[in-house]
Image (tube, grey):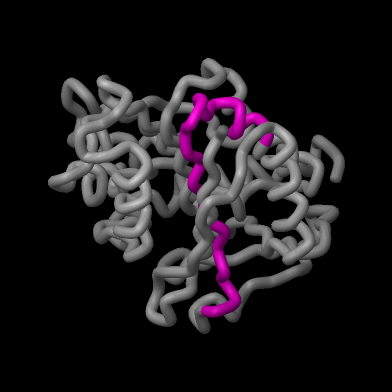
């Protein structure tokens, strides 16, 4: 996929979230069921007493309105933490900033193009929920996962989801053809119920692609320690992947 196509697809997705931001926020109030398991994994790795003897550092990539931090990490029993949420959407960030305090911060950032601008090996926990399917181009996705992996500190965790859109009948209108773009296999566009003029790009990962990402992460010292499906009415709308740096 040419860089111009990649840039245009990223632009289309930014415009989508700019258009539907308020509606999107209304539908993104409750926690994903799988986040309960994520909280258990974080607690299990770092412990209630926190063996690091300092707050764990958490990066939330594509944090949206901040509902992950609001619903998950401030649960009794979890270790103390310092949290940074990053997103590119002004409206959703304005909602997230209501959660800010001395250990929770949000920052505007292009979470697809500018991940590498963050300091490497900075965070004990890096989470990326609801973003991996928006990254265009097979080669660019490899680079993105490598850039993301560099942010994970020694003994830190990388946790991300891959969206199994095909398991939900609401997404049967997805289209795999759009004359504006030179798409790759597994690329689709999907509209928005309350705004038919808004469309977003997403990619359906094949088993081979997931295996390739696993090899890439293994090559930089990240090993998979957990994998599970959760969320949605069918309990399998998202697949969670948990990696730990040795």
Front residue of 90/78: it is 78
For the point 74% across and 57% down, the residue is 211
Looking at the image, residue 75 sits to the left or right of residue 22; the answer is left
* Residue that sits furthest to the left in the current view: 76
The verdict on residue 160 being magenta is yes
**Residue 108 seen from this side:** yes
Looking at the image, residue 125 sits to the left or right of residue 33; the answer is right
For the point 57% across and 28% down, the residue is 115
Residue 47 rendering spot, x and y as whole percentages: 27, 39
State which quarter of the image contains the N terminus. Answer: top right
Residue 151 falls in image quadrant: top right
Looking at the image, residue 221 sits to the left or right of residue 58; the answer is right
For the point 81% across and 57% down, the residue is 183
Residue 210 rendering spot, x and y as whole percentages: 70, 57
Front residue of 92/120: it is 120
For the point 61% across and 44% down, the residue is 223
Residue 66 falls in image quadrant: top left
């Amino acid at each position: 996929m040419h860089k111009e196509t990649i840039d245009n697809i990223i632009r289309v997705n930014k415009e989508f979230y700019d258009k539907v931001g308020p509606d999107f926020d209304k539908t993104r109030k409750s926690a994903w069921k799988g986040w309960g398991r994520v909280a258990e994994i974080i607690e299990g790795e770092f412990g209630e007493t926190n063996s690091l003897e300092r707050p764990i550092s958490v990066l939330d990539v594509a944090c949206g309105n901040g509902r992950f931090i609001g619903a998950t990490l401030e649960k009794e029993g979890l270790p103390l933490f310092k949290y940074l949420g990053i997103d590119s959407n002004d409206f959703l960030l304005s909602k997230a900033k209501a959660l800010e305090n001395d250990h929770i911060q949000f920052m505007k950032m292009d979470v697809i193009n500018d991940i590498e601008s963050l300091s490497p090996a900075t965070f004990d926990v890096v989470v990326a929920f609801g973003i991996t399917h928006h990254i265009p181009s097979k080669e660019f996705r490899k680079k993105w996962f490598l850039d993301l992996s560099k942010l994970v500190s020694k003994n830190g965790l990388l946790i991300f989801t891959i969206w199994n859109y095909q398991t939900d009948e609401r997404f049967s209108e997805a289209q795999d053809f759009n004359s504006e773009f030179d798409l790759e296999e597994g690329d689709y566009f999907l509209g928005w119920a309350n705004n038919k003029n808004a469309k977003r790009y997403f990619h359906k990962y094949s088993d081979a692609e997931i295996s390739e990402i696993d090899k890439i992460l293994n090559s930089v010292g990240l090993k998979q320690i957990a994998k599970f499906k959760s969320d949605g009415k069918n309990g399998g709308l998202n697949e969670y992947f948990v990696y730990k740096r040795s």
